[in-house]
Image (cartoon, rainbow, N blue to C red):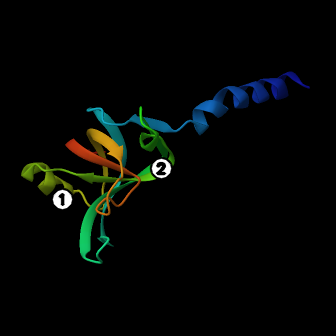
Amino acid sequence: MKPAGWLLSFAILVAAPVAQGATCLQSNVDGAVAEGRLSLGEFEDAAGRKERAFILTLPDMACLSGPDEMDNLKDVKTIHVFSVDDALSSKLRESVGKDVRVRGNPFPSHTAHHHAPIVMGISEIDPL
C-alpha cells in the first residue's frame, strides 16, 4: 500500500467510531442537552382523542441510557418535549419550525400521551 493510501485508511478507521457514535442521554437526569428541529404534531391518545405535542427531530440518531431496562433505547430520532412553565411553553410555541437546543430531564415514553420514544421535560430552550 502506498503511504498516502495507508494514511487515508488510518484516518478512516480512527474517525469511524466518532461518526457512528450516537449521543446518549442519561435517563431521569437533569441537564441533558438535545438539539434539533422543533415541530408541533397532532396525535391521538389511546381513546382516540386528539392531542398536540412538541417533537424535536434530531439531526443524528441518539440513545437513552439508564438503570432500568425500559430506560435503554437505541437509534432514536425524535424526542417529545414539554414544559409545565408558562413562559417556556410560550417559547416552545414560538420556536416551532426552528432549530433549537433544549436542556432538561429525559425519560422513556411510557403512556399513550407520549409521542416519541424519549420524552423530555425541559428547563431551557434556545435558538441555534
Quadrant for the N terminus in the image: top right
Q: Amino acid at mark 1?
A: Glu
Circle 2 residue: 76
Q: Position of residue 126 (x, y in %)?
A: 23, 44
Q: Residue at x 89, y 25 (%)?
A: 2
- Left or right of 9 in this view: 58: left
Q: Position of residue 4 (x, y in %)?
A: 82, 26
Q: Position of residue 64 (x, y in %)?
A: 43, 40
Q: Residue furthest right?
A: 1
Q: Residue at x 42, y 50 (%)?
A: 58
Q: Which mark is residue 94?
A: 1
Q: Residue at x 59, y 37 (%)?
A: 19
- Element at label 2: strand
- Mark 2 vs mark 1: which is more N-terminal? 2
Instruction: Categorize mark 2 by other alpha carbons within 10 Å: few (<14), some (14-19), many (20+).
Output: some
> Viewer-proximal residue, 34 or 64?
64
- Left or right of 10 in this view: 67: left
Q: Amino acid at mark 2?
A: Val
